[in-house]
Image (cartoon, rainbow, N blue to C red):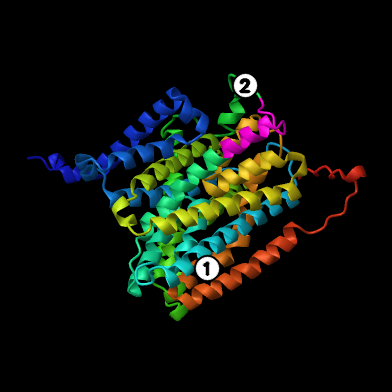
Amino acid sequence: MSSFANPNAWAWLIQIFIIVAALLLANLIRRKVSIFRRSLLPSALLAGLLILCLKPLGFFTSMVDKHSMEIITYHALGLGFVAMALKNKKIKSATSTIKVVETGAVTASTYIIQGLVGLLVTVPLFLWWNGTDFFYSAGLLLPMGYGQGPGQALNFGVTFASWADGQGLVFHGSDFGLSIAATGFIVGSLVGVVYMNILRRRGKLKIREKDSTEHYTLADYESEGEIPHSESIDKLTVQLCLVLLVYALVFLLMFGVERLDLGEFGLKTLKPLVWGFNFLWGTLIGVLVRWIIGRLRKSNLMQREYINNYILDRIAGTCFDFMIVAGTAAIDFNNLRGLWLPLVLVCAAGAVATFFYVLRCCRKLYPDYLYESFFSMFGMLTGTASNGMILLREIDPRFETPAANNLVLQTIPALAFGFPVLLLMGFAPQSLRNTLVSMAIMAAALLLFCLFIFRRTKKTCPQGKPQPETPTK
């Protein structure tokens, strides 16, 4: 028998086949069934839910490999962020630097609120419910699932499970985190649509008409001086090679840090986070590679433009679709036994807190485009940026307000604001005492963010109307 006839040679491809089939079926259902189309649920989430619902069938359970789906989720997250980081950033409409910074502050502070709300549920449950089996820091997975999505929920879920196991506690962190992420997509889509329709019935919001067809120019597909679509090497191949090259550098960086002697703090706090931050290292190295290519172009050492934003967008979109499907399909209901109460409480409390906090921030910061900002931010902070864009397009299909730009450009300030807090993800799970200290630090950080976001600003326009934003040059 040929070695290629061995099922092990096809094991990974079989998982890909399952994801692809589920995506195509989910897309068909979403287009043909009006209730799914009106719900604005992403096709990728619907595909993952289809697999999840079919897994109880005996033969299907054996086909879907949980470990493989988790690995696909992990790498799809990193590759998607690399593709986004490599893009040449172009601002298509006016926005202001201060609004971008404020949006980043809203994002980071919402992560903190979600973490605090999660811990306010799970710490009391640990103390008074079943402290022998439940992990006190499980609530910190709420901002990872809601705010970051399945990839980060999985990464930190696995890390938390290892911490719990070291303390004699039973905690299926990957399933708990992925369940939060899946719930976040549903919350972002359904709650967003329901609230949108409530506002429309009250006359506070108009659903703007969309163009029946979208018009693109050549500039949307490529920029001046790019390599041909197909010469000695295809343009798609070049983009894939760049993405994979950066991801290889990410692996070398994490592999090198793992072998450094960083003392006790590094061993207990930093090193457990290194492999979970593959998306962060991918973003940083991707930006560095993009900068190097730009310098080579300016110095004429590189004559052609090798980066194509359109193709990189498609690669990132594909990676995130696969991440959502695989992350949802990796959930094992058997591992959630005994976790339903904390899961429901954490998700419900997180949804309520996120909704009202984001709405309050948007009323303060974006009075001229309140609802455009709210729906884009709420969708992103319960699902992904794609969810935010989907909701935004319902009321601003041409992206005429700065809401879309704020959402895209806030990534860097949000990362700068939130990175010190992210370090707590490696500190809090070490003990209940560390978790309580982390809650105090997060509360102090939230206070500082609120002082910045809700600070008083001078009103220079008559009748209290907001000053028009000054475009960045």
- Looking at the image, residue 409 sits to the left or right of residue 21; the answer is right
Q: What stretch is highlighted in magenta?
A: 192-208
Of the pair 98 and 54, the residue shown nearer to us: 54
Tell me where residue 93 appears, x and y as whole percent.
71, 37
Of the pair 319 and 292, the residue shown nearer to us: 319
Identity, as a three-letter code, of the amino acid under mark 1: Leu
Say which quarter of the image contains residue 175: bottom left
Most extreme residue toward the left, as rendered? 1
Q: Name the residue under label 2.
A: 211
Q: Mark 1 points at which residue?
A: 423
395 shown above or below 253: above
User: What residue lies at 56% left-to-right and 35% top-to-bottom?
Assistant: 390
User: What residue lies at 23% left-to-right and 42% top-to-bottom?
Assistant: 63
Tell me where residue 394 appears, x and y as whole percent.
61, 31
Based on the picture, tell me whether residue 198 belongs to the magenta stretch: yes
Tell me where residue 358 appears, x and y as whole percent.
65, 50
Q: On the rendered image, what quadrant is the C terminus found in?
A: top right
Most extreme residue toward the bottom, as rendered? 264
Whether residue 318 appears in this view of the structure is: yes
Tell me where residue 377 appears, x and y as whole percent.
62, 46
- Looking at the image, residue 312 sits to the left or right of residue 393; the answer is left
Q: On the rendered image, what quadrant is the N terminus found in?
A: top left
Most extreme residue toward the front, as rendered? 128
